[in-house]
Image (spheres, rainbow, N blue to C red):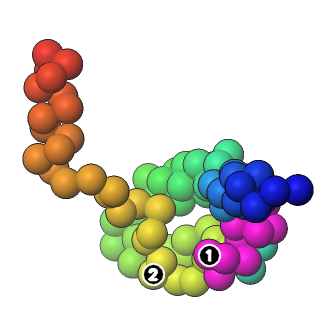
Amino acid sequence: MPYSEAWLLTQSLLGDPTSHVAAAVAGWEHPWSWEAMALADLYDATVAAATDKRHRSRIKKYPRPWPDGDTRRYRPTVSQEQVRAALAARGH
């Protein structure tokens, strides 16, 4: 297998959160699918909505495989100006 093909396959694995390679590189305990991430977020939102406001600080989030406080999947990859320029170019 040529190096270029191995590199492309590795990049593909790193972009897939269900692969063990991506989980290991990201420091997760185990792989997780996009659906599991969405369902965990929905679960947390449902529990928060069904809990009295006085007790919301006691709610524990559904456990994720990544370390607590890790918000890498929510960080934007482009600046706000680039987003606005792209939207303006499309008539928004």
Amino acid bearing label 1? Ala
Q: How crowded is mark 1: few (under 14 residues within 10 Å), some or many (20 or more)?
A: some
Q: Where are the magenta residues, as a range? A: 18-28
Amino acid bearing label 2? Gly
Q: Is there any visible trace of residue 60 in the rendered image?
A: yes
Q: Residue at x 20, y 19 (%)?
A: 90
What is the CA distance from the residue labelled 1 to the residue labelled 2?
14 Å
Which quadrant would the C terminus be assigned to in this image?
top left
Which of the 4 quarters of the picture holds residue 74?
bottom left
The image shows residue 86, relative to residue 39, as above or below, that is above
The image position of residue 83, as x and y in percent, is 20, 41
Which of the 4 quarters of the picture holds residue 17?
bottom right
The single residue placed furthest to the front in the displayed view is: 2
Which residue was labeled with disc 2?
Answer: 69
Q: How crowded is mark 2: few (under 14 residues within 10 Å), some or many (20 or more)?
A: few
In front of the other: 91 or 49: 91
Q: Residue at x 62, y 75 (%)?
A: 26
The image shows residue 85, relative to residue 92, as above or below, that is below
Q: Of the residues under marks 1 and 2, which one precedes in the sequence?
A: 1
The single residue placed furthest to the right in the displayed view is: 1
Q: Residue at x 66, y 57 (%)?
A: 11
Residue 25 lies in the magenta-colored region: yes
Classify residue 9 as left or right of residue 80.
Answer: right
The image position of residue 5, as x and y in percent, is 76, 52
Q: Which mark is residue 26?
A: 1
Classify residue 91 as left or right of residue 74.
Answer: left
Secondary structure mainly formed by the magenta segment? helix
Asked whether the beta carbons under mark 1 and mark 2 sit within 8 Å of each other, the answer is no
Residue 70 lies in the magenta-colored region: no
